[in-house]
Image (spheres, rainbow, N blue to C red):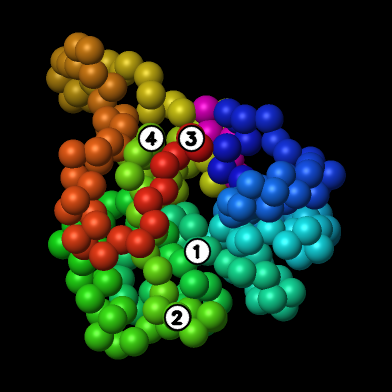
Amino acid sequence: NMRTRSSKSFSIEDIKDISLLCKLHHIKAYITLNTVMYEHDMQLLKTILQEVKKQQIDAVIAADFSVIEFCNQLNIPLHISTQANVSNIASVQFFARFADVVVLARELTLKQVAHIKNEIVRRNITGVSGQLIKIELFVHGALCMAISGKCYLSLHAQNASANRGACIQNCRRSYTVTDTETKEELVIENEYIMSPKDLCTIGLVDQLIDSGVAVFKIEGR
């Protein structure tokens, strides 16, 4: 998942316990498998998904087409991760054949989100359940300077791929900007020039609801 550096990963054996605990308290359990997958990941991925199916985890959150394909084969409910960078209605239409929920790209404006929701209704775009596909949106958490987190700084600097959940967050450091021609240096005081402010939409919740968002996603949950 995309949080391998900031959290202790669950084991496959934990899936059963988590599923039982959630069902006991009548809450849903999702599992994130939303990184880029390589060929050597396939066997472990299949093993995880077989356990997910067995323990009736409510949904898998994914972006890589291999995960989407295997979930489709195993008839496992699927949510499309923001890592898929869904930014338009055509993409929603495409993913609707696999999922019931799509997490839109964090770069979209409220106007763009509302347009996508309106088009879902107008075109009657339904997910695999036959219900209108739902829009999910990040409402709190860290933002990335790259589109939907597709950054290669960490990979370049430390061979730690952000797209494999191992980002060392190079952007969240202070830097001195130097003009290569004049050698003039510009120090951005109290600012991190490559790091945007964290997302906090508590003052916009009513507008988010009005735009048609069905699910609020809080990073760090």
| The disc label shown at residue 215, or none | none
Among the two numbered marks 1 and 4 on one chain, the one whose residue lies closer to the N terminus? 1
Q: Main secondary structure of the magenta part?
A: loop
| Relative vertical location of residue 124 with respect to residue 218 in this rendering, above or below | below
Q: Nearer the viewer, residue 111 or 174?
A: 111
| Relative vertical location of residue 115 with respect to residue 7 in this rendering, above or below | below
Residue numbers of the magenta segment = 164-168
C-alpha span from label 4 to label 3: 9 Å
Residue found farthest to the front = 25
| Relative vertical location of residue 34 with respect to residue 93 in this rendering, above or below | above
Q: Amino acid at mark 1?
A: Ile
Q: According to the image, label 1 marks what residue?
A: 80
Foreground mark, 2 or 3, reads 2
Q: Position of residue 207 (x, y in %)?
A: 17, 53
Q: According to the image, label 2 marks what residue?
A: 131
From the image, which quarter does the N terminus lie in? top right
Q: Position of residue 5 (x, y in %)?
A: 61, 30
Q: Is residue 207 magenta?
A: no
Among the two numbered marks 1 and 2 on one chain, the one whose residue lies closer to the N terminus? 1
**Residue 187 can be seen in this image:** no
Residue found farthest to the bottom = 123
**Residue 53 can be seen in this image:** yes
Q: Amino acid at mark 4?
A: Ala
Q: Secondary structure at mark 4?
A: loop
Q: Tell me, yes or no, whether the two marked residues, 1 and 2, touch with CB atoms within 8 Å.
A: no
Q: According to the image, label 3 marks what residue?
A: 220
Q: Nearer the viewer, residue 169 or 47?
A: 47
Q: According to the image, label 4 marks what residue?
A: 142
